[in-house]
Image (spheres, rainbow, N blue to C red):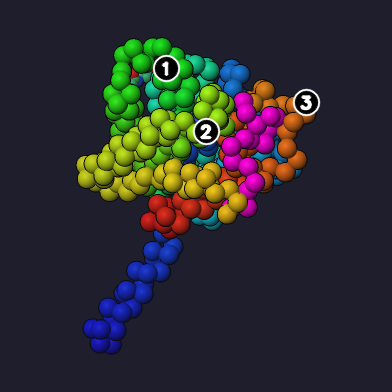
Amino acid sequence: MTLASISFILIIFQFLLEIDAKVSSIIVFGDSSVDSGNNNYIPTILRSNFRPYGRDFDGGRATGRFSNGRVPTDFISEAFGLKKNVPAYLDPSYTIQDFVTGVCFASAGTGYDNLTSQVLNVMPLWREVEYFKEYQSRLREYLGDEKASEILSEALYIISIGTNDFLENYYLLPYRPSQFSIEDYQNYLAGIARNFIKQIYELKARKISLTGLPPMGCLPLERTTNFIFGGNCIDRYNQVAISFNQKLQALVESLNNELTGLQLVLSSPYAGLYDIIQNPHSYGFEYSATACCGTGRFEMGYLCDEYNPFTCPDANKYVFWDSFHPTEKTNGILANYAVRSSLAVFQ
Ligand SMILES: *[C@@H]1O[C@H](CO)[C@@H](O)[C@H](O)[C@H]1NC(C)=O
């Protein structure tokens, strides 16, 4: 064999290896954008384990996902050839066996800031990390050290959090604004994000996707508070999301330089979701300013219940399911976009 043909074979071999180098598992941290049911098992009023939530999910089950169906991480897991849905860590009907290829530690209503999680008595981000540590020891016990370590370092970690720090905390409660300008608060949160990523890196995470903020001034609930301006998006909030995402991008670059072997990407839903909201018809939607559930202007959680007579019959016509969360259809579009862009390096 000539040297050229040997190197050709090597290149092909490497190519095949790369095709095979998909992630072993999807491990999720964050808030209601990705919570698959953990809040059902903690003493909070922020829940969605009742109809009409989940009415388009498998078997019409209300799992605690804040949507009519699946959340983006479910679609991402499926796109990576793993489970169709990412199981919630606190759900006692699952065993460690169910968590080998994916697990969700997210808690609706939480934020980077500890104070945010206190507003609705949900899991602070540090508690999600505590559960992750507990999960690691259970996984090691179940699979042995070597296999567990391999899964942990080959998993894709998805972090989706931050909207509540601004909308449920900074812009709602007096405490943080009395301490921080909005710019300082953004830096404070980015500092927590940095520590959090370092912490899970120490715990073997290498492939990480940090999710940016959505155009949060366009959530139907925020438009409702903006009635003086005709229910338009609150531009100020969108600008904060854009500048926070820029800080996260800088954080991603700096951590990739700092931590050996880290593959950290920013997945920003901002541009994609903004385009859907501005041009709903090009995506097959009819409504983007109001949500499907109830009047579509303020209902979420317990206010979005099955006795609300105004809930729409077809959620696929709406970008938003309740006043704070996208429909399954929107989640699928956003997940698919992430899989083809920021997450492509992990395939
Ligand atoms: C949040 O609370 C935890 C537990 O009390 C603490 O360890 C952590 O330092 C706090 N984070 C910040 C940024 O204050």
Residue highlighted by disc 2: 232
Nearer the observer, 192 or 1: 192
The image shows residue 298, relative to residue 158, as above or below, that is: above
In this rendering, would 59 be left or right of 261? right
For this orientation, the residue located farthest to the bottom is 1
Amino acid type, mark 3: Tyr
Residue 97, labelled with which disc? none
Of badges 1 and 2, the one in the foreground is 2
Quarter of the figure that contains the N terminus:
bottom left
Residue stretch rendered in magenta on the structure: 283-298
Q: Mark 3 or mark 2, which is nearer to you?
A: 2
Q: Which numbered circle lies on residue 115? A: 1
Residue at the extreme left of the image, as rendered: 258
Residue in the picture at 59% in, 17% down: 43
Is 328 drawn above or below residue 306 in the view shown? below
Q: Give residue 157's position: percent from left, percent from top.
A: 42, 42
Please tell me whether residue 304 belongs to the stretch shown in magenta: no
Q: Is residue 81 above or below residue 86?
A: below
Which residue is the site of mark 3? 307
In the image, farthest residue toward the front: 229
Q: Quadrant of residue 38?
A: top right
User: Relative to 203, is 160 on the left or the right?
Assistant: right
In three-dimensional space, the C-alpha distance between marks 1 and 3, rounded to whole angstroms, equals: 33 Å
Query: Considering the numbered disc 2 on the image, is that residue within a helix, a strand or a loop?
Result: loop
- Real-space CA distance between mark 1 and mark 2, rounded to the nearest whole angstrom: 29 Å
- Secondary structure category for the residue under label 1: helix
Q: Are marks 1 and 2 in contact (CB under 8 Å)?
A: no
Along the viewing direction, whichever of 176 and 8 lies nearer the viewer: 176
Given residues 205 and 195, the one toward you in this image is 195
Q: Decide: few, some or many residues near mark 2? Use Cα within 10 Å; few <14, some 14-19, many ≥20.
A: some
Q: Position of residue 309 (x, y in %)?
A: 78, 29
Q: Residue at x 73, y 33 (%)?
A: 311
